[in-house]
Image (tube, rainbow, N blue to C red):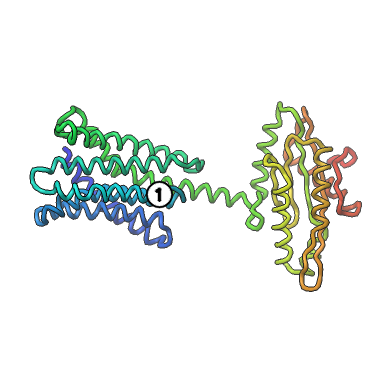
């Protein structure tokens, strides 16, 4: 049974080698896909050596060849390390296992030691799989949690199977394909899963991050890296859900840079972009981790301030207004001066409102700040009520 499954594996691996080769060639600068392809090349080299065994010396067919599968797992570990961008030391551990195994593999390549050499291969695969599981569980990246968990469970199970086979042969001196009962079938299932599921799980791992990054990019402003309108809607909905039944107030503030079009026309859009980037950094530094900042227009920003009363928000925004007002930058022979106007709307404890209503109230308060001379903070009052 094992021999038949290994033959099927060889055919599958050759097919995957071709497929992942094209994938790697489509992304020549992607080291992750390239190293994953290298792992299949190692397996394919082993498959070719299997087919050519009758025509090869034993030290190649039963020595070097026995380390091709462990080498493929070592190369998978390299791909995972590049993907996670950490645990570089595990690369040395993976290849150290192969270097340590090579002398024994060559020593046992002769007749009479095939079973021991197979067990040595099982031992190497088990150790490489253990390294892979440790790497995958060594990060807390949320977007790849499910594929990492699936792959690590497989690697831990595969480690147990392979180390058991090695122990049975090297320590108990049994034939792992016969004793203990069921080990051969378990091994066969593990080999099939390894060949069929692991490549797909690795693709799932890559795609999970790509999808998360696309979603993130779709919610971020490309210039300031703050939330955009779509990201703001989700953040506001989340804060309103938290607000239900919770103590404290939620304040929404709108910020608009005064005469920003004139500034762009006078100093150029590059200068305007620089001010927006500076302002985004200032807002991020001065606000709490629990607060949310979004850029919703050219020079318009929205701030979500949970657990913040109107008075507290007013004091904070006054500090921000003063920080912005003292900003200056030399541009050619002119000095750029910047001011900002703010509008506040507060959802008090026990009150309910739609997110769009809160934003509109803050916008009306901002409009009043503009009417009253700009460079000031105004709060929404009932006389500004939405008709």
Pointer 1 residue: 89
Q: Which residue sits at x=40%, y=62%?
A: 28
Q: Which residue sits at x=78%, y=50%?
A: 255
Q: Is residue 350 left or right of residue 3?
A: right
Quadrant hosting residue 266: bottom right
Q: Is residue 134 left or right of residue 268?
A: left
Residue 328 percent location from the top left of the image: 80, 62
Residue 79 percent location from the top left of the image: 38, 51
Q: Which residue sits at x=62%, y=51%?
A: 220
| Quadrant where the image shows the N terminus | top left
- Of 98 and 287, which appears nearest the observer? 98
Q: Tell how many labels.
A: 1
Q: Give the answer, above or below, for where 160 lies relative to 117.
A: above
Quadrant hosting residue 151: top left
Q: Residues within 10 Å of mark 1 (few under 14, many from 20)?
A: few
Residue 374 percent location from the top left of the image: 87, 54
Q: Kindly tell me whether residue 335 is visible in this rendering.
A: yes
Q: Which residue sits at x=49%, y=50%?
A: 210
Dot 1 falls on a residue whose secondary structure is helix
| Quadrant where the image shows the C terminus | top right
- Of 353 and 174, which appears nearest the observer? 174
- Of 330 and 227, which appears nearest the observer? 330
Q: Kindly tell me whether residue 387 is visible in this rendering.
A: no
Residue 323 percent location from the top left of the image: 80, 53
């Amino acid at each position: 049974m094992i021999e038949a499954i290994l033959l099927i594996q060889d055919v599958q691996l050759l097919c995957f080698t071709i497929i992942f080769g094209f994938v790697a060639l489509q992304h020549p600068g992607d080291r992750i896909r390239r190293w994953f392809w290298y792992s299949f090349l190692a397996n394919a080299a082993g498959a070719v050596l299997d087919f050519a065994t009758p025509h090869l010396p034993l030290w190649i067919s039963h020595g070097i060849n026995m380390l091709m599968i462990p080498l493929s797992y070592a190369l998978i570990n390299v791909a995972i390390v590049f993907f996670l961008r950490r645990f570089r030391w595990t690369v040395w551990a993976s290849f150290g296992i192969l270097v340590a195994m090579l002398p024994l593999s060559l020593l046992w390549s002769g007749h009479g030691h095939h079973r021991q050499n197979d067990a040595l291969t099982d031992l190497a695969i088990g150790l490489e799989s253990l390294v892979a599981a440790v790497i995958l569980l060594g990060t807390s990246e949320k977007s790849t949690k499910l594929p990492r968990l699936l792959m690590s469970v497989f690697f831990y199970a595969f480690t147990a199977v392979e180390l058991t086979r090695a122990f049975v042969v090297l320590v108990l001196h049994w034939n792992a394909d016969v004793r203990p009962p069921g080990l051969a079938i378990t091994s066969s299932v593990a080999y099939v899963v390894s060949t069929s599921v692991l490549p797909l799980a690795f693709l799932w791992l890559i795609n999970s991050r790509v999808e998360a990054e696309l979603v993130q990019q779709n919610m971020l402003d490309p210039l300031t890296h703050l939330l955009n309108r779509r990201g703001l809607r989700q953040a506001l909905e989340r804060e309103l859900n938290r607000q239900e039944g919770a103590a404290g107030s939620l304040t929404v503030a709108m910020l608009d840079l005064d005469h920003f079009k004139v500034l762009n026309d006078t100093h150029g859009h590059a200068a305007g972009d620089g001010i927006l980037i500076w302002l985004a950094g200032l807002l991020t530094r001065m606000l709490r981790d629990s607060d949310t900042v979004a850029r919703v227009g050219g020079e318009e920003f929205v701030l979500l301030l949970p657990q913040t009363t109107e008075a507290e928000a007013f004091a904070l925004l006054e500090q921000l207004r003063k920080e912005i007002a003292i900003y200056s930058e030399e541009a050619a022979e002119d000095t750029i001066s910047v001011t900002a106007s703010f509008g506040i709307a507060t959802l008090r404890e026990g009150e309910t409102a739609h997110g769009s209503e809160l934003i509109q109230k803050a916008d009306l308060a901002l409009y009043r700040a503009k009417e009253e001379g700009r460079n000031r903070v105004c709060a929404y009052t009932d006389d500004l009520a939405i008709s």
